[in-house]
Amino acid sequence: MSHLASQSPTSPSTSPASAMTADAIQAAATTSSAALSFLPDDQVRYPQADEEGYFGGFGGRYVPETVIPALQELEAGFSDAVSDPAFVGHLDGLLRDYVGRPSPLYRADRLAAASGLGAVYLKREDLNHTGAHKINNALGQCLLAQRMGKNRVIAETGAGQHGVATATAAALLGMECAVYMGTEDIKRQALNVYKMRLLGAEVVPVSDGGGTLANAVTAALRAWVACVEETFYVMGSAVGPHPYPSIVRHFQSVIGEEMIASIEHDPDVPFPDAVVACVGGGSNAIGTFAPFVAHCDRAHLPLLIGAEAAGLGVDSGKTGASITKGTPGVLHGFYSYLLQDEIGNPLEAYSISAGLDYPGVGPEHAYYHDQGIVRYVPVTDDEALEAFLLCTRSEGIIPAIESAHALAVLPALGRELGSGAVVFLTVSGRGDKDMDIVRERHLGE
Amino acid sequence: MSTLGGRGDGAMPSASMTTGARRLTEAFSRGPALVSYLMAGYPSSSEAREAVRQVVVAGADVIELGVPYADALADGPVIVRAADAARTAALPGRFGLEETIATVALLTRGESAPDAAGAPIAPATSHTAIRVPIVLMTYYNPIRTMGVHEAAHMMADAGVAGVIVPDMPPEAGRGWLEASRPLGIATVFLVAPTSTPERIAKACGASSGFVYCVSSLGVTGERTALAQGIGAHVAAIRAHTDLPVAVGFGISSGEQAHEVARVADGVIVGSGNVRRQADLSELTAFTRSLAEGVHASQG
């Protein structure tokens, strides 16, 4: 494939498990799984944060001194783990047999036709165990926690997908788990709250501020400062103090790596003209985009598009579009684009989607934005709901409202790129959790 | 003009003659010092200033003035609630770093007229200038938003002695230090119970005025029991610096203050004050008991 700058010598396997011998599977799960890894290998050049955790000036560590040693320990523990074949093999085995990876890259022809595009390939993260991309990262971090000798994890959650994924990984690995969740989100996402409790996690309600994701992150960080010595903080998005953005990017890069493996190994899958993902904190998007940035020459990079939550509109005062409407600032331990008032207080973000109403965005996205590597576009609640319905009725796939923000970009892309264009789009999760919200809106009635 | 200055005030050089760092170090030089944290703008701008004056009269040696901020990551519920109240009580709806610096200016210069918010009658002490050093406790983003140079100049003009920025570890503080050091503003870094010897050395090396020893894990707030091993923790810090070491987080009674003052150069009390900040008689009685506890350790 000419657009791919460096052919990965150890590409993720796309061969079905049934074609492998029992010995090969055993080897993959225990010792040398390099040839089967879903995770990025070190032959490929990913953008790296500098020594202090900055991607082109964004990122860093703005946290109380109490947790700095834990972040240093995490940095060392992470770098040690990802170079350990046993760790990589264990995670790969779980990604395959427990999560169900690789996730399909499905050609959605009716959606493409409705959008005026040549082909739309949906990366089906919604088919993962627990219903979203969040499990890729939660499993990776919980395994890392266990490897570092910590048997208790805490996490924040917005829509509840990261909370459910973390509670799931904790149940699987026999770990103690507490999830911080805003009271407004607890109301919006009752099903996920029940799932977390069923899985044995403690759900800690956070009533500060608007009772949404940003408040949950603050509460979880505050709690972490008190128990940092025995507790591992499983950060759910590509945000937070260094090294979290890099760790989350690493574990989510399976998404884009698999897309690239499909291009390399499946002659029917063309190289895309554009790649689309939704961006809140930005974990599924960074996992989608970063592998293309790593594998492709800049001149041959597909058009990368991040769909931000515009809420009621970027100028309505009720928005989550931190790149479009934000200015650089510090929140939750990192420096990036941020919705803030003129004296530096973070503002409350709004979106119909509980996973996107975050006032900041991951530092690597801020860097991609400044470098012109990714185009970030705002998508309103109404546009997302329209795309939600279109995807549901044209493909029989009910996406998460978060993912519907990415889908909403397609018609405009059709107009811009024309009817021959090929688009890859990450469906970050499934819409089961959003049934109450769409029912309230009488969607499709 | 009379002055409110705590112990040994007669020997204190004026703000214009010396740097904030030296004024702070001075404040710890006559035996253990009481560092009293209050929230600026709470319950109102003028009441907060009066609280500062009263606390100084009651025995505080250093004032730490909190800047109201919407995402106080290192603070517990008492301070968070006061910050939210200060931000929302102020008209036209903004009370932040700039307003806090203006508060310091009014305190260090003395007030001759009712403030702009229209406090009807100036309190009895309002014409007097505060001479004990005042440090600001602010999160990093308000400083960054104002601009490090602008913030440093405004602070210097107002007579701010130093700053404590709980989410700015030394690595993140370079730009601020470059802007503030030449103007004589001290920056106090924090050392945590989890800090390694390397981290302690780094925090001590970057600090001026004093070093803030965080007594225990967690956010700010009153604790019923003092953390174990504070003496050893302070000793570990003293191995790296000649600066005074003040201990904070979780100290909420005269007895606890006394205990800490036996091993440290200063005792920092925050949430216990802020909880009483709206009731001046309660606040001053509390401060007197803390000051007795701290100053009785002078030996």
Image: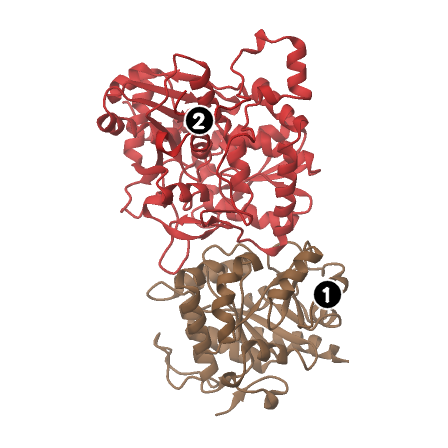
| Residue A206 place in picture, x, y as percent | 51, 45
Chain B shade: brown
Q: Determine the residue positioned at 23% across, 29% down.
A: A416
Which SS class for mark 1?
helix
For residue A388, above or below residue B125: above
For residue A241, above or below residue B195: above
User: To which quarter of the image does residue A143 belong?
Assistant: top right
| Residue B275 place in picture, x, y as percent | 55, 65
As measured in the structure, the alpha-carbon distance from the residue carrying label 2 to the one carrying label 1 is 50 Å
Residue B261 appears left or right of A210: right
Chain A shade: red
Task: Please rate how many residues cluster around mark 1, counting C-alpha atoms within 10 Å: few if below 14, some from 14 to 19, many from 20.
Answer: many
For residue B214, above or below residue B288: above
Task: Determine if marks 2 and 1 fall on one subunit.
Answer: no
Specify whether residue A194 is in view. Answer: no
Mark 2 highlights which residue?
Answer: A429
Identify which amino acid the numbered label 2 is placed on: Gly
Specify whether residue A406 is in view. Answer: yes
Identify which amino acid the numbered label 1 is placed on: Val
Residue B186 appears left or right of B294: left
The label shown at residue B234 is: 1
Which chain letter goes with mark 2? A
User: To which quarter of the image does residue B95 belong?
Assistant: bottom left
Q: Determine the residue positioned at 62% across, 79% down.
A: B27
Marks 2 and 1 close (CB-CB < 8 Å): no
Which SS class for mark 2?
loop
The label shown at residue A330 is: none
Closer to us: A7 or A322: A7
Task: Look at the image and tell me in which quarter the C terminus of chain B lies.
Answer: bottom right
For residue A327, above or below residue A411: below
Residue B19 appears left or right of B216: left
